[in-house]
Image: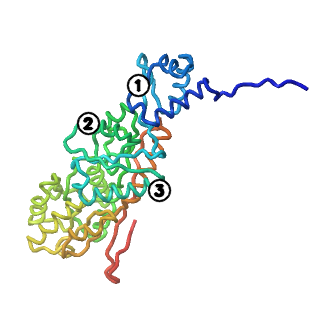
Amino acid sequence: MPITKLVPSENAKGSYPWLAEQLKQAIQAGQVRAGANLPSTKEIGSKYGVSAETARRAAKQLEGEGLLVSHPRHGFKVHARANDPDRGLPVAFVLSGAEQPGLWNEFNRLLFAALQKAAAERGWSMLAVGTGERTSEQVIEQLRDCRVSGMILDAPDPGRLASAEKIGMPVVMMDAWEPAMHVDAVVQDSFQGALLAAEHLIAAGHKRIGWLGPISDSATSRERFGGAAAALAAAGLDIDQKLMADTPWEQLPEAARKLLERRDRPTAVLALWHNSVDALVPAAAELKLELGRDVAMVGWSAEEDWNTYRGVLGDSPVPPTITWSIARLARRTIARLAERRSRPGMSPTLIKVPTRLRLPDQREGTEGLRH
């Protein structure tokens, strides 16, 4: 009877795959924080009773899995990606502005609730983090202490992004984007929405179309203005600079009043933010103008924020409005973060959530949607 030679399993104790598994368990248990260096391969080898070369090969295996990154002359550093959301470690929604989540406005609460629901569908948990006046390094340090597995940003912040990159934390921007930041972002399709809004007013016969809101302060503002300008250009209409109220948020009420009190005031206004609508409604009332009759308007609102939007309108009739879904935005954001975790080397992508034109139906008292 032939004698079969027994070959030790490659996962046997003392092999580098075995050691890689031991190190992975230690990392996932939080014994080495994100951004911190592993002990040297010599120290690891001594602790586990293997050679330094076996320790190096085990670390290289974990580097290939995206849990470690090697730095010449500095050994291996733990990536925040090693914090696994499938093991209960949270994803952070980092909100600029108010430090305490209880101080967030209704829109921010809707964003976070949608993220919680989308994350829960994957078995993930969410952590709400307000930044207040803290530095990027202080915020990242809090996230490291909480063993956060990924970060969702609500506003462009190069410093925070750079701090996250240092510890290998996956990042996706939500409802905000700046092209120079080279990071994944999931946003409303602002260009499409503004294009639909302007096309609607043009089809209704308006030629003197005004604008109320910022133009140059963010990529979102520029995209919305670009969509409106494209619709005007396609219709052969010039942009009347006198009717373009390019103004900071805090100056919107004054800008709205000045726009409507002009002798050559616009016959319609693109008010493509809640704040713009909130400024236009009282300005029209002050000047005894009826929205929809004396001056037309197209607004902008998330579907989930519709009740707040209607409250801003007061007794004014609901105008044609560009709408979009916070739930869809949140699902795409969580999905992109999962992709970023599984393939950290892929190129950053800008993902746009569709916007639609919601029209009041005068015949039935209901509202219809147009794409």
Q: Residue at x 27, y 34 (%)?
A: 137
Which percent across, then down, holds residue 288? 9, 74
- Choose mark 3 or mark 1, whichever is in front: 1
Residue at mark 2: 138
Residue at mark 1: 37
Q: Is residue 226 positioned above or below 18 on the image?
A: below
Residue at mark 3: 121
Left or right position of 352 against 261: right
Q: Is residue 20 positioned above or below 231 on the image?
A: above
Q: Residue at x 28, y 43 (%)?
A: 156
Q: CA separation, marks 3 and 2? A: 30 Å
Q: Secondary structure at mark 1?
A: loop
Of mark 3 and mark 1, the one earlier in the sequence is 1
Which percent across, then down, holds residue 322? 32, 64
**Furthest residue toward bottom:** 363
Please, what is the three-letter code of the amino acid marked with disc 2? Gln
Which percent across, then down, holds residue 245? 16, 56
